[in-house]
Amino acid sequence: MAGSDKRKQSLYFPEDMLKEIQMEATRQDRSLSWIVQKAWKIARKEIGKYPSINDAGDDYTEEPDDDRP
């Protein structure tokens, strides 16, 4: 992180996702924060392709994520 501007922020994850992140952090001997930051850097271009809720037209229907029940 450029400049190392550190701010606390609470994030909430589903329990099973948090366990996966914790297992990966342990495997890599890294912090949860480091894992989440790297995941964001890898995924942000793909996430940026998703339409904003403000961009949605009247015919917009949200497709559920694969892991939704």
Image (cartoon, helix red, strand yellow):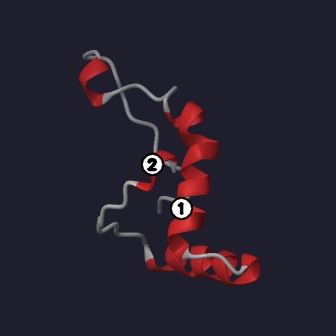
Q: Is residue 47 visible?
A: yes
Query: Which residue occupies 24% across, 23% down?
Result: 54
Residue 21, disc:
none
Q: How crowded is mark 1: few (under 14 residues within 10 Å), some or many (20 or more)?
A: few
Query: Which residue occupies 47% across, 63% down?
Result: 69
Q: Give the image quarter of residue 39.
A: bottom right
Tag 1: amino acid = Val
Tag 2: amino acid = Gly
Label whose residue precedes the other's in the sequence (2 or 1): 2
Judge whether 55 appears above or below 46 on screen.
above
Q: How many marks?
A: 2
Residue 36, disc:
1
Q: Give the image quarter of residue 41.
A: top right
Q: Mark 2 points at which residue?
A: 3
Residue 54 is left or right of residue 2, and the answer is left
Residue 36 versus residue 7: which sits nearer the camera?
7
Judge whether 56 appears above or below 3 on screen.
above
Looking at this rendering, what residue extends furthest in the front direction?
A: 3
As measured in the structure, the alpha-carbon distance from the residue carrying label 2 to the one carrying label 1 is 18 Å
Residue 18 versus residue 53: which sits nearer the camera?
18
Which mark is nearer the camera, 2 or 1? 2
Residue 18 percent across, percent down from the top left: 51, 76
Residue 7 percent across, percent down from the top left: 31, 61
Residue 16 percent across, percent down from the top left: 53, 78
